Amino acid sequence: MNVENLLRIIGSDFYTGVPDSQLRALCDYLMARYGIDPKHHIIAANEGNCTALAAGYHLATGKVPVVYMQNSGEGNIINPVASLMNDKVYAIPCVFIVGWRGEPGVHDEPQHIYQGEVTLRLLEDMDIAHFVISKETTEDALAAKMAEFKGILETGKQVAFVVKKGALAFDGQVKYENSNAMVREDIIRHIVEHTGNDPIVSTTGKASRELFEIRAARGEGHEKDFLTVGSMGHASSIALGIALQKPDKKIWIIDGDGAALMHLGAMAVIGANAPQNIVHIVINNSAHETVGGMPTVAGKIDIVEIAKGCGYPAAVSVDSFEQLDAALEHAKNSHCLRLIEVKCSIGARADLGRPTTTAKENKTHFMDFLVSWMPTGEEDK
């Protein structure tokens, strides 16, 4: 189905969400039609954020907003849906468009499997009526369902369209780019060259996939890396949990701007605890690049000043490999919490692979490594 027909049938003029590769047609159409427009389209930091934005839109206009997201974001909307929007509280209507990753019977990555199994069940538990859109769904069937949904929305309840893989199409072209020169895979390669035998916690998406392939190309194992394949935005908190229990070990975080923004409060907790053994690297391309390249707000904020405001005693921003290498070397030899923001271009290799080990294997090997780990140079003492 052409995404324009879906939105025409829904009939809203305000959209907010977090981009999803399964909803690429929708995201590209919204960017082509509206760009980032506070009156019509906002890309939020996380799914709870956009649900609250949608509630504000309804309060101001009386109209029904649309929130789009990957099904992994359902967990983030439970609180505002249950305690704000629910018809037993403020009765705020909303249309959710949910990309169905991990649909049962359809091959997907491990982080999506269980989420895919419970996608419809979670909507039912939140009392959100839903309709599944597939490649076979006709405009007539969709229009009939939307007519039914309008009656539900008028009671102050929410509804959801759950979108299967390949169900939506958009014929237009949208190009996402920035003026930064450094490529993320090369940035990660430089990081690995400086971290030596230290453990790395890497964020979800292409960053972890690139780290995995860099290790393989170097003829190394993957035991030093915890690949946060799901739970976007939580890599830094995982790293903090490790660092506080292993104060004699330097822990490096490879984060992304979209992930860091999704749960920005984690930086405040890290800064308040101020572990001397964390180096937090935020690779900033101001884009949700793993799911297509749609923009984040990271190009309009000062991540370094935010880190300092959160209590990081040292934070720098770099935009060249010379600056990056100097910052990495300084971090390697220092003993305080540090943040390095690295300005990055948008894009990745078309043939980028995925980890060939399972998530459970990664966990086991990483935990075994933490037990036996010694800092670079200590092995010879």
Image (cartoon, rainbow, N blue to C red):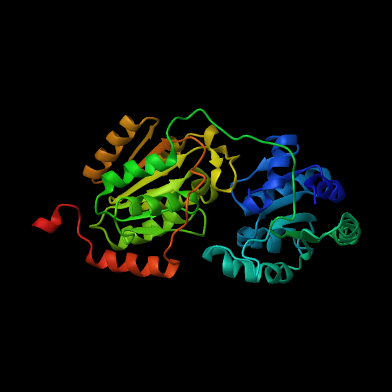
Residue found at the far front of this picture: 351
Which image quarter: residue 311? top left
348 or 98, nearer to the observer: 348
Q: Can residue 346 be seen in this view?
A: yes
| 345 w.r.t. 10: above or below | above
Residue 316: x and y, percent? 36, 35
Residue 319: x and y, percent? 40, 30
Left or right: residue 84 compared with residue 226: right
- Residue placed at 37% from the left, 46% from the top? 280
Residue 51: x and y, percent? 69, 52
Residue found at the far top of this picture: 179
Left or right: residue 347 compared with residue 326: right
- Residue placed at 73% from the left, 37% from the top? 172
Left or right: residue 232 compared with residue 247: right
What is the count of numbered marks?
0
Which image quarter: residue 212? bottom left
Residue 325: x and y, percent? 29, 36
- Residue placed at 60% from the left, 67% from the top? 115
Left or right: residue 344 compared with residue 334: right
| 364 w.r.t. 45: above or below | below
Quarter placement of the C terminus: bottom left
70 or 81, nearer to the observer: 70
220 or 287, nearer to the observer: 220
Q: Can residue 311 be seen in this view?
A: no
- Residue placed at 34% from the left, 61% from the top? 242
